Image: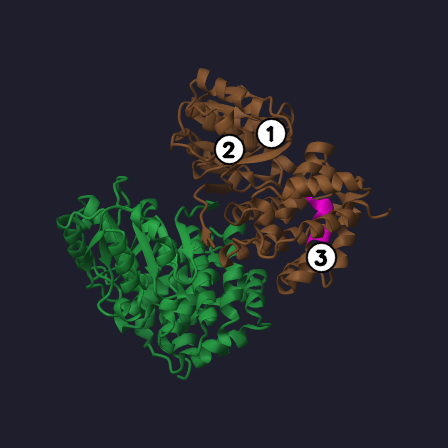
Chain colours: A brown, B green
Amino acid sequence: MIQQYYMPSKILMGEDCVQTNSEAFLKMGKKALIVTGEHSAKKNGSFDDIIKVLSSNGQTWALFDKIMSNPTIESVYEGAAIARSEQVDFIIAIGGGSPMDAAKAINLLACQDIPESELFRGQYTDEILPMVMVPTTAGTGSEVTPFAVLTDNRAQTKKSIASDILFAEIVILDAKYMDNLPKEITINTTIDALSHSIEGMLSLRANPITDSMALESIRRISKCFDSLKTGELTREQRFELLYASTLAGMVITNSRTTALHALGYPLTYFHNIDHGRANGLLLGEYLKYFGENWPERANEILSAMGFSKISDFIDLLDELFGEKEMLTDEQIEKYVSMASQSFNYKNSRVIPSKDDMIEILKTSLKKDK
Amino acid sequence: MIQQYYMPSKILMGEDCVQTNSEAFLKMGKKALIVTGEHSAKKNGSFDDIIKVLSSNGQTWALFDKIMSNPTIESVYEGAAIARSEQVDFIIAIGGGSPMDAAKAINLLACQDIPESELFRGQYTDEILPMVMVPTTAGTGSEVTPFAVLTDNRAQTKKSIASDILFAEIVILDAKYMDNLPKEITINTTIDALSHSIEGMLSLRANPITDSMALESIRRISKCFDSLKTGELTREQRFELLYASTLAGMVITNSRTTALHALGYPLTYFHNIDHGRANGLLLGEYLKYFGENWPERANEILSAMGFSKISDFIDLLDELFGEKEMLTDEQIEKYVSMASQSFNYKNSRVIPSKDDMIEILKTSLKKDK
């Protein structure tokens, strides 16, 4: 089994680190394509900070701000056409996982002629533009991964482009952009990061380097559990969650995700459930399954969270996520069947059977029936 | 203050990972320069493993096996001349910190014309050969740092070449090469790694990413404290120490070391005390100083080691290192004065005064007087 660790991006961190690292931007080239969503980057101050630094550096930019949640294949081809026509030298992604994942795919398609049928095949050349990633949520870890997860409407699920050429040159971590993140988004993104670290530890590709990062990421997140319930987080806690989510990203870059992520995708695709919430709704029962089948590992994870038993973790998730979406038996069977086709379904040391997964889904999402 | 994390080398790990990653070697080029010491790599099996993989790949090699402990400037110019005359495509370092640090300097000097007077000035071009690092001790962390520490006889101390071009392409972590490492070397190297993680957490450049790695590195090392006393370590423990020392290397790559390392150098230079031992002799009193001046941080470190008070840690180090070398007052004043000129002397959040450092040295090395 592959045991490796690799993450070559440079991480710059701390309050106002865009301003204090203007030289890092200057080195990237003359003209940037800024890839972001329609609103949030403009509201939280990140867009302004970037624009100011580019201006003072004498750099120019084009803007592609049409990234929606769960970006589609169509949208990244559209962004790539703009990158080409604007002849940009580098790409800056600002936002959550969606703009960052989209930016990677846009970059690839701006530099290489790849038809849609070949997009996920992994046969790419080395041509790519340098990238800066500015996460404005603390969950996805996309800033330090070589993955671009896109929604494939034909396949009715999400699919990943994965290539080492997709690592960013520079990653900017400043939690001040998260000051006003609504409670629901904070919970969903935090639990997404938590699921990355937990799945990283359950992965077939887990190794002691990634485990070390995962454990510390879990500890940092767990210190904020109580504040997550109220949604009132200090700037310091926002930084803790941001560092934890980046560590979790460094974990899955090497460990990949597992069956949980495979199962979360259909919940997002068919029920429009936010990605972090989709994982979080299943995470408690999923870890419980590992508690029965790989108890040492599950206990290590629980203990890093400060819990002595799995039911405490399940209670926490229930409190954070409130009323759950409910699924029918037919839906559950369909989603497990779809998920079992994916790469990450088999990427854990103990692989749940289809029946195990059906049970996890039923217990999670048919609880009161 | 700079808050950044960067370590772009790819780490391949696990038992027999040289054999299972022969393709990674193949990609490096046709001919290697193997840089190592005279004996240990040939005894512990690492040299044979590498040679077999190169042979089966159809690659050739030249050998420079003259690296002594604390390599000199002269020796790396000699190695560079061989790299040039043999026209090698890449460099493989096998051994402890000395061969790995020497290999980085040899590589630099093989690719760039740098007179000795300019060697430590940091003005280098990008020309460099790809490198593979195969550590056969678990201490230095050199496999993941961009530093080459050399002995400068003119300056009567050690000096560092530091450049991002010195990161290896590939790092190989296989603890089987450490099976027969003598007790004394095991202790010295382990405590060297421990001091890297501890100093990393005390550094002015510490950040939550490096702290996360440092804390886990400290925890992994501490689990082996009892076995260090006997010198009987299992293969599993050897792996734990190797992963911990690599994590500690990833820490100091970004945090750098502090006054402790600055003070250790004259002990090595003038008294021929092994580098790890030199740090270890002072580490207890050094951490005690921080306990008085930055108690939250020192307590975090102690608690990661499983100690509730500093005296327990000092007792452990005393037991591991046995009878200590003794210094005169004149020597102590001279070494503190020399150390205070160095970069790392001022690289901690609380900077000990010269008098503080004299006190630390006296308490450590004049204990019974």
Q: Mark 2 and mark 3, same subunit?
A: yes
Query: Can I make out residue B168 in this image?
Result: no
* Total labels drawn: 3
Q: Which residue lies furthest to the left in this view?
A: B85
Q: Mark 1 lies on which chain?
A: A
* Nearest the eye: B142 or B63: B63
Q: Which amino acid does label 3 sit on?
A: Lys
Q: Is residue B257 left or right of residue A190?
A: left
Q: Is residue A324 above or below residue B354?
A: above
Q: Is mark 2 on a helix, strand or loop?
A: loop
Marks 2 and 1 in Cβ contact (< 8 Å): yes
Name the disc covering residue A152, or none. 1
- In the image, the segment drawn in magenta is A279-286
Front position among marks 2 and 3: 2
Residue at image x 47%, y 69%? B236
Q: Which chain carries label 2?
A: A
Task: Give the CA distance from mark 1 to mark 3.
Answer: 31 Å
Q: Position of residue B233 (x, y in %)?
A: 45, 75
Q: In this view, does B219 lie above or below A24?
A: below
Question: Mark 2 highlights which residue?
Answer: A120
Sequence-wise first label, 1 or 3: 1
Q: What element carries label 3?
A: helix
Q: Which amino acid does label 2 sit on?
A: Phe
Q: How crowded is mark 1: few (under 14 residues within 10 Å), some or many (20 or more)?
A: some
- Report which quarter residue B151 is drawn in: bottom left
Residue at image x 71%, y 42%? A187
Sequence-wise first label, 2 or 3: 2
Q: Position of residue B26 (x, y in %)?
A: 30, 48
Q: In this view, does B31 lie above or below B229?
A: above
Q: Mark 2 and mark 1, same subunit?
A: yes
